[in-house]
Amino acid sequence: MNASLSPLAILGIVAVYFAVLVLVSFLTSRNDSNNADFFLAGRKSPWLLVAIGMVGSSLSGVTFISIPGAVGAGGVNQAFSYMQVVMGYLLGYAFIALVLLPLYYRMGLTSIYEYLRSRIGPHAYKIGAFYFLLSRTIGSSFRLFLVAVVLQQFVAAPIGIPFAVTVASAILLIWLYTFRGGIKTIIVTDTLQTVCMLLAAGITVYYIAGALETDFSGMVRLIRQSDYSQWFFFEGGWSDPNNFFKQFLSGALITIVMTGLDQDMMQKNLSMPNFRDAQKNMLLFSIVLVFANLLFLCLGALLYIYAANVGLSLPASSDLLYPTIALINLPPVVGVLFVLGIVAAAYSSADSALTALTTSFCVDFLGMRETDVVPDTQAGTQVLEENTKRKRLLVHSGFSVLLFAVIMAFELINNTAVINSLFKAAGYTYGPLLGLFAFGLLTNFRVREEVRVGKVRIPALILVCLLSPIVSMVVDYYSAELLGGFQFGFLILAFNGLLTFVGLVTLSELGEPHGDDFTGTDYA
C-alpha cells in the first residue's frame, strides 16, 4: 500500500467524509424532523438534485467494485455484456415514467404498496410490503457487505479491528446522519456521494492512461483491441448467461421491480411536488446512469490491461481487482479518491435503504401518515407527534440492528460473487411484487378470499405469493437438467412474477376488483 495511505490515513479520510455528511444532516433537519420531512421531504425536492442522487443509489458498491472486476473474470457480465442489461434499464425506466409515476402521484401515496391495498385488498398490501422489507434488507446487506469486506482487508484488519466492529461502525455512522432528516437528508447526501463515486472512477481512468502512456483516443483503441470489448452476445443461444435477449429483458424487469416497485427508489421520486418533475428526474437519471455504467466498464477493461502490462498477479476474487490497483499500484491521490468512492458506495445505497425500510414499516405496518395530528388542542397534537417520532426512531434503530445481523450472516456463508448473489436473491423476493402489480394493472379480477387445503382455509393470495418463490427456486436449480442446458440467470425474476400472476388469475373470480377503502391526496 502507498506509504501515504496507511490504515490510519484512510480512517482519517473516512472521518472527514463522515463529518461532512453529519453537517449536511444538521443543515437539512435543523428546522423540522416530522413525518412529512422524514418520509417524503415535504414533497418539495428539486428534481435535478434527486436525479443526480439516484445515480449513486443505483450504482452502489456492486457497480463500483464488482462490475469492473467482472469485465475480465469470465462468466456472467464478462467484457461489456453488462451494457445489454443497461439497455434494458432504459425500457424499464420508460415504463416507470409513463405508467407507474402518474399512478402513484394520482393516488397521493406515501408508500407505493398502498396501491395494492386499494386495488386488491389488505392481504396484497401486507404481503407486498413484507416482500419489499425482505428484498431490500437482503439487497442492501449484500451491497454493504461487499464494501465492508474491502475496508476490512485494507483498513481495519492491518490495525487489528474485527470485522464485526467494522460493520457496526459503518451502520452506526449511517444511523447518525439519517435518523432525524430521513429522505430530506438522503437527497442531498446521495448527490454528494454520486459525485464522489464518479470522480473516483474518472480519476482512476486518467491515471491508468498516464501509466500506460496514452491519451483518450489511445485508451479507446486499447479497449477495442483487447479481449474485453464485446458488447453483444448472440452466438451462445439461450444457454449463454450473457445472451443479449436474456440480459436485455432481465435489465428491463430488474428496473421495473427494483426501482418502480421498490419503496427505496420511488420514495425519492414521490418527494417531488408533481409527477411531471418526477418524470423529468427519471429521464435525466436514466441517461446519466447509462454513461456512468459505461465509465465503470471502461475502468474494468483498463484495470485488466494495466495489470497485464505491469505483470501484476490478479487477486483471487475479481471484486478485489480495483481496490488492489487503486490502493497499492497507483499514486496516492487515486487511493484517496477510491476510499471516498467506496465509502460513498456503501452509504449511498444503505442510507436510503434504511430510510425506506423505516418508512415502509411505519406506514404499512404501524399505520403512520405524513401528518399525524390531533384536531382538538395544540398540546394534543404535540404529544402525538412526539409519540410517532419515538416509534419511528425505534423502527429506524431496529432495522439498523437487522442489517448488522444479516451482514454478519453473509460473512459466515459467503462463497459466491456478490453481484450474482444480489440479483438472484432479488429474483426470488421481488418476483411476487412483480406478479401482484401486474395482476392489479392488467386485470379486472378479484382474488378469492380463501382456498381450502385439506381442512385448513388459507388466504388465496398469501398462498400464491409464498409458493411462487419456492417453486422458482426449485425450477432454477434444476433448469439445466430439465430444459436441455437452459439456465434462467436474471430471468428467474420474470418466471417468478409470471408464476405469481398466473396463480392469482387462477384463484380469481369475475366481478369488480375490490380492496380496502383508501383515499390519498392527488399530487399530480
Image: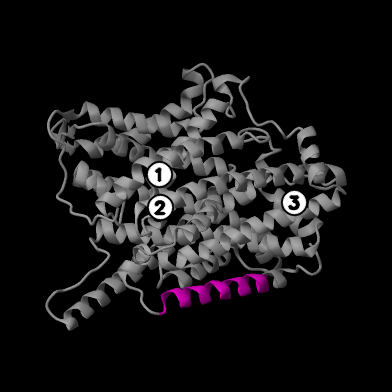
Compute the Cα span from label 1 to label 3. 33 Å
Tell me if residue 304 comes above or below residue 233 in the rendering: below
User: Residue 97 shows which numbered tag?
Assistant: 1
Which numbered disc flags the more N-terminal residue, 1 or 3? 1
Element under disc 2:
helix
Which numbered disc flags the more N-terminal residue, 2 or 1? 1
Which numbered disc flags the more N-terminal residue, 3 or 2? 3
Compute the Cα span from label 2 to label 1. 8 Å
Residue 185 spot, x, y in % from top left: 45, 68
Tell me if residue 238 comes above or below residue 81 in the rendering: above
User: Residue 205 shows which numbered tag?
Assistant: 3
Which residue is pictured at 25% across the width and 51% down the height? 107
Q: Does the magenta stretch include residue 382?
A: no
Question: Which amino acid does the dot numbered 3 rest on?
Answer: Val
Where does label 2 land, which residue?
278
Tell me if residue 202 comes above or below residue 340 in the rendering: above
Compute the Cα span from label 3 to label 2. 33 Å
Element under disc 3:
helix
Which contiguous range is marked in magenta?
11-30
Outermost residue to the top: 484
Question: Which amino acid does the dot numbered 1 rest on?
Answer: Ala
In this rendering, would 296 be left or right of 280? right
